[in-house]
Amino acid sequence: PFRLTRSKLSEEAHGGLVELRAHLVAAMAVATDADVEDERACREASLQKLRKRPRRAAAVPTGKREFSFGIITDVQYADIPNGKSFHGVPRYYRHSLEVLKRAVKDWSAKDLQFAVQLGDIVDGNHPSEKAHEGLTSVTRLFEQLRCRTWHTLGNHCLYTSQREKLHNYLNIPAAEDGASYYEFSPVPGWRIFMLDSYDVSVLGWPEGHPRRLLAESILNEKNPNVNKNSPDGLEGVQRRFVKFGGGVSDDQLRWLERKLRQAKEQDERAILCTHLPLHPKTAHPNSLLWNFEQVNETIASFAGTAVAVFSGHCHRDRETFDEHGIYYRVFEAVLECPPGADAYGHIDVHENCMVVHGVGRLNSARVLFRS
């Protein structure tokens, strides 16, 4: 209901509707988690909030295009029949590979510098004895691109394989402590930070590992349920303390702060990528990073350097801006595309803005960088 047809809209109107859509989607997410049944009341509340805010100017690209890259998330391929999520949402495990094939073909016809895969490349329900075949089926498609694909790890990745094995499959340059965070620079003046949402987690680390022990301690303190995958009894954003979640370690956070400071000193800009969402307006509470507030505080202290945060995991296309003008976006999942549908895109980055070109269920947007 919130998709936009650009050919029928002026740039100014399009910019306003993109922001309106962000507020409506965020409000509906909150409404869902609060068990609010009246969607119309939810929309009206969002409209009232939007009317009180100053209008954001439409993002009109200036200067040359600096770089472009493909974006995709939650492929969750598995060689099994279609199924459903815990909430009854259909999942198309084998068809997800067909969506990825179309994405690779589309991207190959464009001048892209790289592609980003935001986690959950395979599904945890993939037969364990075929884990190698599942990973290979997906990585071979990415290898058909003329450019490199940069990956983050999701919980489903870690259900199927240990971290070190995934580093090898996905060519992830592991951090010194063995975690999966890193950075790269596609062109001078820009940095891309690939964060590890499961740096502190019971997933992906062997028994007795310090990061796993810390995660177990956090879950025991924050989640009273015997089944730590259940958020029952937890309220609001406290529902994020579940076993399929995770957090950023102090070491990773210090690394991020140091790297962002370097970028600021060198007058560079940065995009951050992570599997777990960081902003409550873009995700259900049980999908948020455990220490999202701490990470966001670090990012906000470098507003103007950090311009956008991209995530997956939540499976629904949602977006918002924080008070510093940083763009937070969760992208639509490939897994839930029925036959014939798609969910991927590419992003053109200009001097003053970025343009998200969505395909299928992934929405397009223009995002103006705050000066």
Image (cartoon, rainbow, N blue to C red):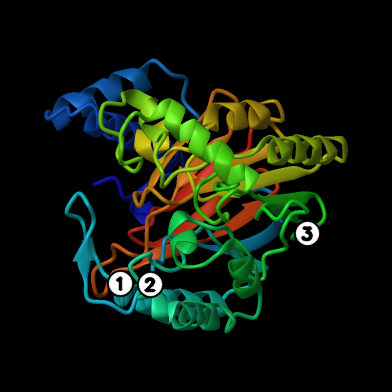
Place residue 185 in its image quadrant: bottom right
Q: Say few, some or many: other residues with alpha carbon within 10 Å of mark 3 (under 14 / 14 to 19 / 20 or more).
A: few
Q: Most extreme residue toward the right, as rendered?
A: 266
The structure residue drawn at horizontal position 49% and vertical position 80%, both measured from the top left corner, is 132
Compare marks 1 and 2 and give the one earlier in the sequence.
2
The residue under label 2 is 77
Q: Say few, some or many: other residues with alpha carbon within 10 Å of mark 2 (under 14 / 14 to 19 / 20 or more).
A: many
The amino acid beneath tag 2 is Tyr
Judged by depth in the image, the label closer to the viewer, 2 or 3, is 2
Residue 305 % position (x, y): 73, 36
Name the one closer to the observer, 246 or 214.
214
The residue under label 1 is 93
The structure residue drawn at horizontal position 51% and vertical position 33%, both measured from the top left corner, is 217
Determine whether label 2 and label 3 are within 8 Å by CB: no
Residue 86 % position (x, y): 22, 51
Determine whether label 1 and label 3 are within 8 Å by CB: no
Determine whether label 1 and label 2 are within 8 Å by CB: yes
Judged by depth in the image, the label closer to the viewer, 1 or 3, is 1
The amino acid beneath tag 3 is Val
